[in-house]
Image: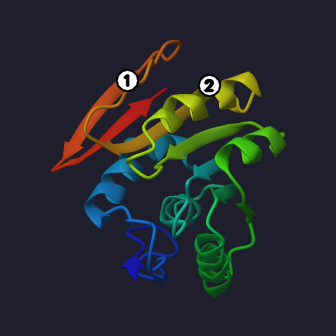
Amino acid sequence: MIKITSGKYRSRNIETPEAGTIPTKNRVREAMMSAVTSEIPHARVLDLFAGSGALGIESLSRGASFCVFVDASADACQIIRGNLKTLREENAVVLNMSYEAAIEQLKEPFNLVFLDPPYAMKDSYQRSIDLLRAHGLLKDECAIVLEYEGELPLKAEGFSFRRDYTYGKTKVLLLR
């Protein structure tokens, strides 16, 4: 279990999958949300590789209007649905499919995107961004937040803003 750090669900516990995911630490999640505070109110949010759904739920807690959660794991999606039900949050949809299939299916663009795949899937960061762009799913003022460890092979071309944060081994990259 982890706690939501701020907003209307502050201090509420949410479940996390027992295997296959590593939830973002509270300190890192709080910092990520602080970095995109201005983008959150009324935002359409995409939480790719959602795991427990903590990043999307944090966004909804802080005033996002809608969130799409995507995870390839059926267990993770069941946990996210349970967390949303417990919170009585209805402004969300959970897609149990690969990130590529989800991006192919999505129609409306997003203000805020969280990319937190398993750290071994380094190529999925660039691939996700490329697919989101190709399908017109990034609004002009979109912010993308990437969480990773080690080096990240990423071309951040076309973004006017880039900021890196480090929290121990965990790194966060903010693109606008």
Task: Give neighbour class at mark 1: few <14, some 14-19, many 20+ (Cα, 10 Å).
Answer: few
Tag 1 residue: 162
Instruction: State how many labels appear.
Output: 2
Q: Residue at x 49, y 66 (%)?
A: 54
Q: Disc 2 or disc 1, which is closer to the eye?
A: 2
Tag 2 residue: 130
Snapshot quadrant of residue 87:
bottom right
Q: Residue at x 68, y 83 (%)?
A: 85
Left/right placement of residue 169 relative to residue 108 reads left
Task: Pick the quarter of the image with the N terminus.
Answer: bottom left
Instruction: Provide residue 26's location: percent of width, then percent of height.
Output: 31, 66
Instruction: Provide residue 156's location: percent of width, then percent of height.
Output: 45, 19
What's the amino acid at mark 2? Answer: Asp
Identify whether 115 is placed above or below 52: above
Q: In the image as oriented, which residue stretches furthest toward the bottom?
A: 86
Snapshot quadrant of residue 86:
bottom right
Q: At numbered mark 2, what does the secondary structure look like: helix, strand or loop?
A: helix
Which residue is more in the foreground, 24 or 117?
117
Whether residues under marks 2 and 1 lie with C-beta atoms below 8 angstroms apart, the answer is no
Q: Residue at x 44, y 66 (%)?
A: 21
Left/right placement of residue 40 relative to residue 70 reads left
Q: Is residue 43 visible?
A: no
Instruction: Provide residue 124's location: percent of width, then percent of height.
Output: 52, 37
Instruction: Provide residue 127's location: percent of width, then percent of height.
Output: 58, 30
Looking at the image, is mark 2 or mark 1 earlier in the sequence? 2
Identify whether 51 is placed above or below 13: above
Task: Give neighbour class at mark 2: few <14, some 14-19, many 20+ (Cα, 10 Å).
Answer: few
Identify whether 134 is placed above or below 45: above
Left/right placement of residue 91 relative to residue 17 reads right
Q: Is residue 92 visible?
A: yes
Query: Which color scheme did the rendering employ for the protein?
Result: rainbow
Q: At numbered mark 1, what does the secondary structure look like: helix, strand or loop?
A: strand
